Image (tube, rainbow, N blue to C red):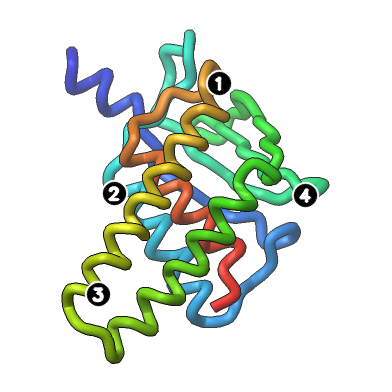
C-alpha cells in the first residue's frame, strides 16, 4: 500500500507553455530540459485532501505570475495556482550572480575557491526551495528535493545564459 501511495504522489510529466514562456537559446533549452528530466525522475508531489495522482504539471507565465496548472495523469484539470514572482526576484538575481561567479571560477580559480562559491550557491538554492515550499504551503505537498528541482526550473525560465 505504501508503494502505491508513493506512486500516486508524484509528477509524471512537466511541460512549459511556449506561448507565454517562449523558446530560449540552446543553453536555456538545455537547462530547462535537464530541470524537467530531474523533476520527473525523482519527486514527491501531491495535492492536499486529494487521493488521486500521479500528476502532470504545466507551467506558464500569466500576467507576470507563475501559473502552475496541475492535472491528473489523464489530463483532467485539478487546480491552477498563480504565484507572484516578486518574492523570488532576489533569489533569482542572487542565484544568477553566484552561478556566473561559479562558472567563471571553474575556469581559473583554486579548488578551495570553487568549493566556497559552490557552497554559497547550494545555500541560495536551498533558501529558494524553502521559499517555494512556503508559497505552496496548503496548496501542494512536495518534499524539499522536489522544491529545489522546481526552483531550478523557475530559474532556468529566467536565466539569461
Residue, disc 1: 139
**Disc number lying in front (2 or 1):** 1
At x 33%, y 82%, the residue is: 105
Residue, disc 3: 113
Residue, disc 2: 41
At x 48%, y 64%, the residue is: 32
Residue 52 visible to an observer of this rendering: yes
Residue 130, percent from left and from top:
43, 35
Residue, disc 4: 64
Residue 92, percent from left and from top:
56, 56
Q: Quadrant of residue 6?
A: top left
Quarter the N terminus occupies:
top left
| Label 1 element class | loop
Residue 108, percent from left and from top:
28, 91
Q: Earlier in the sequence, mark 2 or mark 1?
A: 2
**Disc number lying in front (4 or 2):** 4
Neighbour tally class for label 2: few under 14, some 14-19, many 20 plus, Cα within 10 Å:
few
Amino acid at each position: 500500500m505504501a508503494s502505491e501511495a508513493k506512486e500516486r504522489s508524484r509528477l509524471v510529466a512537466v511541460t512549459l507553455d511556449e506561448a507565454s514562456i517562449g523558446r530560449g537559446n540552446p543553453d536555456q533549452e538545455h537547462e530547462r530540459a535537464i530541470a524537467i528530466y530531474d523533476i520527473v525522475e525523482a519527486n514527491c508531489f501531491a495535492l492536499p485532501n486529494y487521493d488521486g495522482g500521479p500528476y502532470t504539471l504545466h507551467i506558464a507565465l500569466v500576467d507576470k505570475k507563475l501559473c502552475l496548472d496541475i492535472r491528473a495523469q489523464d489530463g483532467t484539470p485539478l487546480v491552477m495556482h498563480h504565484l507572484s514572482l516578486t518574492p523570488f526576484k532576489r533569489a533569482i538575481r542572487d542565484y544568477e550572480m553566484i552561478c556566473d561567479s561559479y562558472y567563471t571560477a571553474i575556469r581559473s580559480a583554486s579548488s578551495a575557491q570553487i568549493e566556497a562559491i559552490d557552497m554559497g550557491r547550494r545555500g541560495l538554492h536551498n533558501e529558494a526551495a524553502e521559499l517555494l515550499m512556503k508559497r505552496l504551503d496548503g496548496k501542494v505537498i512536495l518534499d524539499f528535493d522536489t522544491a529545489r528541482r522546481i526552483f531550478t526550473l523557475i530559474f532556468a525560465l529566467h536565466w539569461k545564459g
